[in-house]
Image: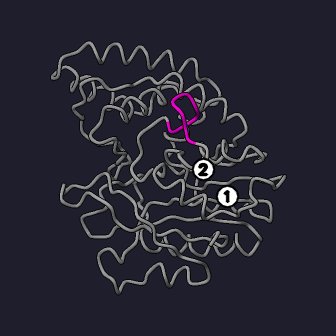
Amino acid sequence: MKRLTEKSAKPFIKWVGGKTQLLDEVKRSLPSDLGKRTGLTYVEPFVGGGAVLFWILQEYPNIERAVINDINAELICTYRVIKSNVEALIQGLNRIQAEYISLGADDRKEYFLSKRALFNSRNISDIETAALFIFLNRTCFNGLYRVNSKGEFNVPHGKYSNPKICDEDTLRADSALLQKVEILCGDFSETGLFAGPDAVFYFDPPYKPLTETAAFTSYAKDGFDDNEQRRLGRFIEDIAAEGSVFVASNSDPKNVDPEENFFDRLYHKFTIKRVSAARMINSNPNGRGCISEIMISNAFNI
């Protein structure tokens, strides 16, 4: 399997639940002849940080087009700016980086809070939105993306001595790869238009919380509860019935309750595999480590 190098396309942000560590498992969940097929469309309804997107388009250059979607409007704005106006974005990020790095600790926090307020005002250009999205991601606590009930980004300032706010090589590599990608912003169900025998879907939705206190990363103000998980399950059945290949990831409730069969029931028509994944962010340090996650597919290479 090709490995992502420093100058190859890769995620331009840190993202909780990013799938870089599970790319081997994703590949094992795809058809073994995927690299030989023609006319393929890759669809990712919850693109997030894009780890799978950037990997799969380099691993399978035979994919003719890709469609990505997310309900997070600021995230999608950033993807679009990287695709269409990356040099202006780099210029803006370099300016922010120079201003921020030159400050002392207290002034950095004030600078961060002022930029967070400007970002939440939503009264700025797309290029400014993208630059602030990346800046906040690189300098906030643990790289989280969390919003309050008003949809405002509310993650506090992180304490990094020398954060890399502008990664020019990655941004340019990502921009080149995104030229073949159609970028949507909306509900995951809108990607059903692309279902069919030549479509490959990867689903990485907001994970089902394992405990009541685990859901501290709300990516959208309306959240993603069990009813949404069930709606997604029905959608996956629909696109599979149209001949689409799919892989889906989610949390494994059996980490907490061995008798919990929520996903086993929801996806009983498909193959479910449990894989080991490192939990990088947890409010309790003792809760960090390797846990089980599930991968669901109709095309496992077993």
Q: Are marks 1 and 2 in contact (CB under 8 Å)?
A: yes
* Residue 271 drawn above or below residue 291: below
Q: Secondary structure at mark 1?
A: helix
Label 2 environment density (alpha carbons within 10 Å; few <14, some 14–19, many ≥20): many
Q: Which mark is residue 191?
A: 1
Left or right of 104? Residue 50 is right
Residue drawn 48% across and 48% down? 20
* Residue 68 drawn above or below residue 292: above
Prevailing SS of the magenta stretch: loop
Residue 76's quadrant in the figure?
A: top right
- Magenta stretch bounds: 3-11
* Residue 107 drawn above or below residue 136: above
Q: Which mark is residue 69?
A: 2
Observer-nearest of 127 and 293: 293
Observer-nearest of 131 and 299: 299
Earlier in the chain: of badge 1 and badge 2, it is 2
